[in-house]
Amino acid sequence: MNFNTLRASLVAAALTLGASLPTQAAMLTWNLSGVQFDDGTIATGSIKMDFSEYAWKVDSFSVSTFNGALSGFTYDNSNSDLINTSLNGTNGFYLIDRSVGRYFNFGFTAPLAAAGGEVAFNTRISYECMNCSPQRLVTAGSLTTLYAAEVPEPSTGALLLPTLAMMGWMARRRKHLVAK
């Protein structure tokens, strides 16, 4: 085995190893499940989040509440903001309507995590209000994920293509050397 063949084999092995390493981000859809307010109404909807190694960022959301102590309303990307607060840390966030001062405080018993699963509402700190008068308290419910769709990072495909090209080049060269 000559030096060039050895070097090509090592490069191919390194590229193959790099392409097989997990370089993925988790995109999770959290669904409101069994969310009830103290006025007998409910909340439904979902929040789509992209998790990285250190934090999460919201991709989109649509959460609807229904007529009761407050009128029904749908919080979504077009009319509201989702704000992660230092008060709740990763254990909660606010959905805030941009126009009238209405907001929904989400507080949880555990942090939201890239692994997904089910996280119960902390009923002591979860509520919806219109400038805090009137308000309605969350009495039950959780956020749940049905699946964790892992999205390959672009680097995975970018590493795989040169690896396959290198392996094809090595096979062609080997065939050419045998023919001589």
Image: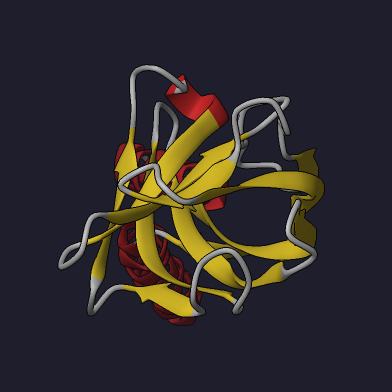
Q: Is residue 139 visible?
A: yes
Q: Is residue 21 visible?
A: no
Q: Residue furthest top?
A: 87
Residue sitting at x 23%, y 79%: 78
> Could you say where residue 142 lies in the image, as x and y percent from the top left?
77, 49
Relative height, residue 165 to residue 94 (above, below): below
Q: Residue furthest left?
A: 99
> Could you say where residue 132 lies in the image, as x and y percent from the top left?
39, 42
Taking depth in this image into account, of 89 and 8 the one nearest to the observer is: 89
> Could you say where residue 92 lies in the image, as x and y percent from the top left?
51, 34
Colouring used for the render: secondary structure
Q: Quadrant of the C terminus?
A: bottom left
Residue sitting at x 40%, y 46%: 133
> Could you say where residue 145 lies in the image, as x and y percent from the top left?
74, 59
Relative height, residue 149 to residue 9 (above, below): below
Taking depth in this image into account, of 93 and 35 the one nearest to the observer is: 35
Instruction: Report the label total.
Output: 0
Relative height, residue 27 to residue 126 (above, below): below
Q: Is residue 26 left or right of residue 119?
A: left
Taking depth in this image into account, of 65 and 14 the one nearest to the observer is: 65
State the image quarter where residue 100 is shown: bottom left
Residue sitting at x 60%, y 38%: 126
State the image quarter where residue 41 is shown: bottom right
